Image: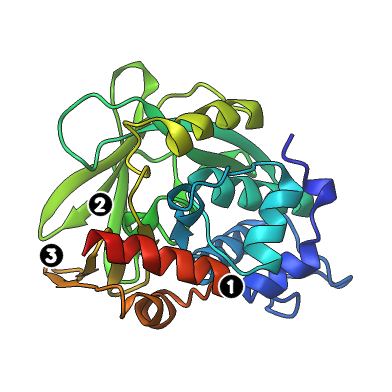
Amino acid sequence: MWSGDELDLDAYLARIGCPGDSGIAGESGELRPELATLYAVHRAHTAAIVFESLDVLLGRPVALDLKSIEAKLVHDRRGGYCYEQNSLLAAALERIGFEVSGRGARNRSRGHCLPAVTHAVLVVTVEGEPWLCDAGFGYLGPREPLPLGRPGAEVRQGEWTYRVREEDGGVLVLCLLRAGVWRDLYAFSPQHYHPVDYIVLNHYSSSHPASSFIGRLVVHHPSDRVRRALVGRELTRLHPDGRADREIVGADELLAVLDREFGLRLPDRDAAELVRIHRAED
């Protein structure tokens, strides 16, 4: 389903800093499809690979075949957005031996309007229990898997707390606790999505004028404490208590901020074009 047999698993594990000697490998040195492995891989992936949609801003197509994703996110050490991130994570988990299926979600973090299904998430089944896995929701997203069989249970990840609640029709909603208030992040139905479905969603997100990624710089990264997001010219540092520090990033500072705050370095040609676009917005 996810082309896991095509993935260079060793290169992926090296990219995310999750080696076989981390205590989750069996006697043969291979990773075991167990819950501890799922936690370790998910957490390492979200720590190492940032959320970014720079190719959209640069006017380039976003390819979703596994080899293209692997080349970009693993070998070129770039980031990506949800379709790329979760397709790569799905391939790795499938290669390890997990049962992985896709879902399509509606982003509720932007208000009370009814958005289209544009977000890709994963459901991984371990010993008969389903777990939500998502490496591609940016700075508000979870660092670790969340249990789906216990709706309403609060799950603390670092200094951030999540829960999954259930609505009519089997719809599940991921929520984040911020400043004492539960806020919906996204909602998804039981319908299974396949890689070909993400190709259609990706076409909208990367090319439709109404997409939030068109003409706008977007780079995010979650952490156990401060979450960071650079959207357009504004850098936000979000704290667990609800405080948000904001600053404007000019074109002359952009590359240094991408490196310092997100660990993201671009080839000279891409960096120059990004600075040119950013300067045009000053």
Q: Is residue 83 above or below residue 263?
A: above
Relative to residue 1, is residue 160 depicted above or below? below
Quadrant of the frame with the N terminus: top right
Numbered disc 3: secondary structure = loop
Residue 9 visible within the image:
yes
Question: Rounded to the nearest whole Å, what is the CA distance between mark 2 and mark 3?
Answer: 11 Å
Tell me how far mark 1 sits from mark 2, CA to CA: 36 Å
Question: In the image, 239: left or right of 157?
Answer: left
Q: Which residue is mark 3?
A: 242
Q: Amino acid at mark 1?
A: Pro
Q: Position of residue 40 (x, y in %)?
A: 58, 67
Task: Say which label, 2 or 3, has the lower sequence index.
Answer: 2
Q: Quadrant of residue 196?
A: top right
Q: CB atoms at circles 1 and 2 under 8 Å apart?
A: no
Which residue is at the far right? 28
Q: CA distance from mark 3 to mark 1?
A: 35 Å
**Tags 2 and 3 touching, CB below 8 Å:** no
Give the label on residue 176, or none: 2
Secondary element at tag 2: strand
Q: Position of residue 33 (x, y in %)?
A: 72, 54
Is residue 130 or residue 177 the one in the foreground?
177
